[in-house]
Image (tube, rainbow, N blue to C red):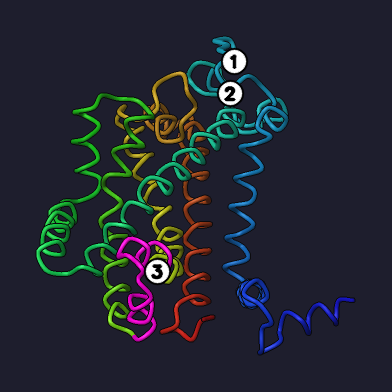
């Protein structure tokens, strides 16, 4: 049965559109499976997702429960990562902090990537003054460092995880717009687009049904690579008190509170720092693997 399924998925002459899509996914999965770093990245991200979903089962203590009698205890069998200055279990706070990190990553990707994808496709397809206006706005955003712009936006909107997500999303879409526009320019005058126009398709239908799907591969790679930067930006906002507010166990805010004890009670700031580094590496490894597989310039899957 496996050999039959393998032969069907590797058939060079697909019998239907669904067959072609499944065969492409199978080739991508096979190539990713042979990329050690990509597999490691997938494992880390899957662990992040599972940790976020099953945090109440994995955590050993209440993440916000204070116990001043157990403050600044080193890692032990009772507290695997020690306790912070208020006696809260750091392991449990890191585990529940995975939920906040996952929410930030998902919402930023959902908000920024589609917006940038659509803006870039519209600019590249129509060209002319529409392209100049949209890309002019994009260049304005790209000219400012992401973290500085995010700080300004959060300062204007007010501290909080919701405003931090909005600010990070606003600073992230321009890069996606640039990629989408570049992809659109490569095939907007191709024969198959001209054939679709001759059939009476509206510009909206051409962009949504034919151009945007062709830009997805590059967009997925870019989103995967950008997630590490999103995590670091969110941690930076939390570090200075503009992200998630106490008593939420956000990793950046945990590092900020632990920096006063870094010399004597190193675990307070180090443990959430390890979590940030590990998850960021996971997204970087996955992004590099997807780029190798999906980017045609690198000989990836088409």
**Foreground label between 2 and 3:** 3
The disc placed on residue 73 is 2
Circle 3 sits on which residue?
215
- The quarter holding residue 202 reads bottom left
Q: Relative to the observer, which residue lies in front, 6 or 255?
A: 6
Q: Residue at x 72, y 79 (%)?
A: 9
In three-dimensional space, the C-alpha distance between marks 2 and 1, rounded to whole angstroms, equals 6 Å
**Labels 1 and 3: the sequence-earlier one:** 1
Furthest-right residue in this view: 1
Asked if the magenta segment contains residue 196, the reply would be: yes
As drawn, 280 above or below 221: above
Asked if the magenta segment contains residue 299, the reply would be: no
In three-dimensional space, the C-alpha distance between marks 1 and 3, rounded to whole angstroms, equals 53 Å
Give the class, few, some or many, for how many residues have Cα within 10 Å of label 1's Cα (few <14, many ≥20). some
Q: Relative to the observer, which residue lies in front, 82 or 223?
A: 223
* Residue 18 point in image, percent of width and height: 65, 71
184 sits left or right of 32 in the view: left
Give the class, few, some or many, for how many residues have Cα within 10 Å of label 3's Cα (few <14, many ≥20). many
Label 2 with label 1: CB-CB less than 8 Å: yes
**Labels 2 and 3: the sequence-earlier one:** 2
Residue stretch in magenta: 191-209
168 sits left or right of 281 in the view: left
As drawn, 228 above or below 290: above
In three-dimensional space, the C-alpha distance between marks 2 and 3, rounded to whole angstroms, equals 51 Å
Element marked by disc 1:
helix
Element marked by disc 3:
helix
Element marked by disc 2:
loop
Q: Residue at x 60, y 45 (%)?
A: 48
* Residue 95 point in image, percent of width and height: 60, 34
* Residue 239 point in image, percent of width and height: 34, 33
Circle 1 sits on which residue?
70
Q: Residue at x 46, y 35 (%)?
A: 251
């Amino acid at each position: 049965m496996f050999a039959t399924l393998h032969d069907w998925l590797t058939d060079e002459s697909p019998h239907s559109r669904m067959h072609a899509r499944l065969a492409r996914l199978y080739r991508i999965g096979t190539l990713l499976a042979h990329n050690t770093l990509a597999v490691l990245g997938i494992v880390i991200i899957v662990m992040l997702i599972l940790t976020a979903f099953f945090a109440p089962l994995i955590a050993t203590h209440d993440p916000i429960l204070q116990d001043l009698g157990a403050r600044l205890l080193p890692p032990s069998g009772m507290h695997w990562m020690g306790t912070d200055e208020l006696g809260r279990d750091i392991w449990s706070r890191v585990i529940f902090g995975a939920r906040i990190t996952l929410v930030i990553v998902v919402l930023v990707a959902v908000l920024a990537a589609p917006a940038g994808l659509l803006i870039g496709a519209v600019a590249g397809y129509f060209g002319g003054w529409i392209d100049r206006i949209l890309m002019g706005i994009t260049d304005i955003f790209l000219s400012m460092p992401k973290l500085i712009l995010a700080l300004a936006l959060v300062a204007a909107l007010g501290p909080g995880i919701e405003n931090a997500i909005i600010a990070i999303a606003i600073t992230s879409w321009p890069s996606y717009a640039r990629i989408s526009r570049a992809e659109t320019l490569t095939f907007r005058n191709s024969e198959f687009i001209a054939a679709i126009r001759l059939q009476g398709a509206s510009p909206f239908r051409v962009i949504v049904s034919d151009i945007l799907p062709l830009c997805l591969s590059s967009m997925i790679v870019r989103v995967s690579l950008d997630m590490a930067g999103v995590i670091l930006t969110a941690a930076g906002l939390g570090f200075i008190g503009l992200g998630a507010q106490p008593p939420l166990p956000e990793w950046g805010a945990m590092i900020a509170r632990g920096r006063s004890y870094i010399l004597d009670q190193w675990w307070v700031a180090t443990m959430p720092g390890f979590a940030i580094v590990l998850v960021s590496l996971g997204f970087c490894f996955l992004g590099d693997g997807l780029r190798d597989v999906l980017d045609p310039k690198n000989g990836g899957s088409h």
